[in-house]
Amino acid sequence: MTKAKRRRRAAAAGCLLLAGALSACSSPSPSASLSPPSPAAVPATPKHPVTLNILDVAGNLQLTKGMIEDFVKAYPNIIAKVTYSKAPSPSMAGKLQAEEQAGQAQTDLVLTGTDGLSAGIANHLLVRTLPDFSSRFPGLMRNYLPPAAAMQDLAQGFGIELVYYPSGPLLEYNPHAVTNPPTSAAALLAWAKAHPGKVEYAEPENSGPGRTLLMGLPYLLGDSNPKDPVHGWSKTWAYLRELGRYIRYYPTGTKETMQDLASGGVDMIASTTGWDINPRALGTVPKDEQVTLMQPMRWVTDAQYGVIPKGVSADVLSADLALLKWMLQPSQQAIAYDDGYFYPGPAVKGVTLSMAPASSQQVIRTYGRPEYDGWIAGYPKETSLPATEQVTAFDMWDRLVGSAKK
């Protein structure tokens, strides 16, 4: 087990121990009930402005903090103040369990990816927003981009999708070292065999590009069921074991792969649109690095959500719903272009780069790629694995692939 995994599991265990300690020390109050306020009991606006405590377990604030602050300025009668905290996604469930069992809800809104969403659903920790509060989000599904609507379906009604992107899989490479970049999975394997130690991807559990490569390979290889890592990925697992023979090690995060590419330690890494643009804009990776895609290309899409923990008051729930609705306005969604981190970023229709802040427009003009718009429009899009299947795929990768490099 890697040090990173030991830290994550220790954090989760600590939260669970805290939950037990809190529940032993005090009897759960009515606010700790697993039944949230009924829709009829939730006012359109809170009786008094609330303080909203927002937990980010997905790096989402980089995309949405501006939207939240705009709302607070526009509606001081709803939110008086916002506090922010960040935590690793695996610790989210334990934290919310501790708060709910103690009857002391301290987290009012969580910004999460599919991993935290899955944990929240599996542990019955979240308010069901849809269809319970559908009237607060008129035309929600109609307003999403079609691939984003498919990602909203993965939330099973327990979250509101805030940002979306067609992630990858892409390959990013040093054009001075890679003169004939691979355009298929077979060509990637041949290149890796001819250049051992020069291709790299991070552990899928901790890396968007690693995860996207993992979920994209079943389509590239023609596996029997790309949505079933247990029974439908025989070609994928065999391919990854063979590719692993020519990979030196699997970093614990994407940033490390970017640093290895920049230093010349490797010449090719797994990437996505956002991980291509943003590190070059930040100077982590040289501006002239290039990307390629593999055929038959299918985008694996990704999204992040706002989810509401059970145990919040009716007034806080009212403020949460109003904020989430606000964040889906096209004018606010344009903020999600950011510095290309989740490119493009907006989840709803009718949002163009021309609507984004001037700084975002400049970054995309300088570090974006003209071919992206054509690629995004031209290739089919597949949703990420449902969260439970993602966890299964990560465990299988650890056992069948990653363990060879431990």
Image: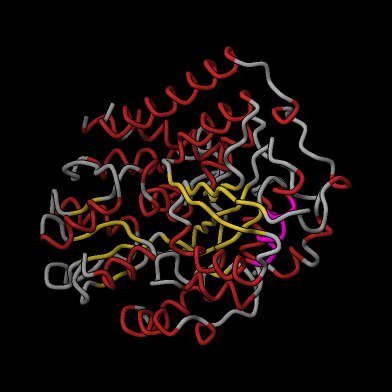
The image shows residue 112 at horizontal and vertical percentages of 53, 48
Answer whether residue 320 is magenta in the image: yes
Q: Main secondary structure of the magenta part?
A: helix
Which residue in the rendered view is the most extreme toward the right?
Answer: 40
Judging from the image, the colouring scheme is secondary structure
Which segment did they paint magenta? 318-326
Q: Is residue 24 left or right of residue 14?
A: right
Q: Dividing the picture into quarters, in which one does residue 177 lie?
A: bottom left
**Which residue does the image show at 15% across and 54% down from the upper left?**
198
Identified at 54% across, 57% down, the residue is 303
Task: Decide which of 274, 46 is in the foreground and name it.
Answer: 46
Quarter holding the C terminus is: top left
**Quadrant where the N terminus is found in the figure:** top left
Position above or below: 343 against 155: below
> Which residue ends up furthest to the top in the rendered image?
24
Residue situated in front as seen by the camera: 250 or 242 = 250
Q: Is residue 64 magenta?
A: no
Horizontal and vertical percent position of residue 329: 66, 72
Viewed as shown, does residue 52 lie left or right of 366?
Answer: right
* Looking at the image, residue 199 lies above or below residue 404: below
Number of numbered labels in the structure image: 0
Nearer the observer, 118 or 386: 118
Residue 397 left/right relative to 243: right
Residue shown at 43% from the left, 56% from the top: 220
